[in-house]
Image: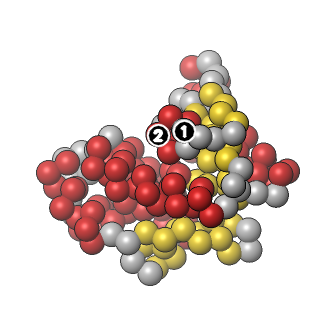
Amino acid sequence: MFKIAIDGPSGAGKSSVAKALSKKMGIVYVDTGALYRTVGYYIRSVGADPKSAEQVTPHLKDINIEVKYENGTQCVYLNGENLGDKIREPEISMYASAVSAIPAVRAFLLETQKSVARSNNVVMDGRDIGTVILPDAEVKIFLTASVECRAKRRVLELK
């Protein structure tokens, strides 16, 4: 399998580049952020504090995440339910950011991410992609942008 890893700070354009590259190459784009958003969605649904490892970690055993590709689009299923755009709400973004800082959550999602890469040619962007998730990627890119550019991209995204 051929793997491309794109790392870099938030707002640098990793997802935009990864999506364009996957389309041009005809390979799978893995939105790793959607996986963290899915965990965040579940944690919100059970009323746990997303910043508390003690509250989040026990719930991981109740989360089953499946990544499927339907009509060329990544769909993330939580316990059998396709969440669609429910994970794109601003509040879920905050939950995703908080849970992603918890080592147990990162470990929990590690195998899901590696599994997709084992069975598909992929372009994957997100945290620790080139070092932890795809250390053997054929191509590794660290994409960056100025703070001003990153802030402008985030403002446009939120509009």
Query: Would residue 69 be visible to someone looking at this image?
Result: yes
The quadrant in which the C terminus is found is: top right
Tell which residue pokes out farthest to the right in this image: 24
Tell which residue pokes out farthest to the left in this image: 54
Q: Nearer the viewer, residue 152 or 81?
A: 81
Query: Would residue 126 be visible to someone looking at this image?
Result: no
Classify 2 as above or below 64: above
Badge 1 vs badge 2, beta-carbon distance below 8 Å = yes
Disc 1 from disc 2: Cα separation: 6 Å
Q: Nearer the viewer, residue 109 or 117?
A: 117
Q: Residue 129, image x and y in percent?
A: 53, 40
Q: Quadrant of residue 130?
A: top right
Q: Residue 119, image x and y in percent?
A: 62, 64
Residue located at (57% from left, 20% from top): 147
Q: Amino acid at mark 2?
A: Val
The quadrant in which the N terminus is found is: bottom right
Q: Which mark is residue 132?
A: 2
Q: Which residue is mark 1?
A: 135
Q: Amino acid at mark 1?
A: Pro
Under circle 1, the secondary element is loop
Answer left or right for 27 relative to 155. Answer: right
Q: Quadrant of residue 7?
A: top right
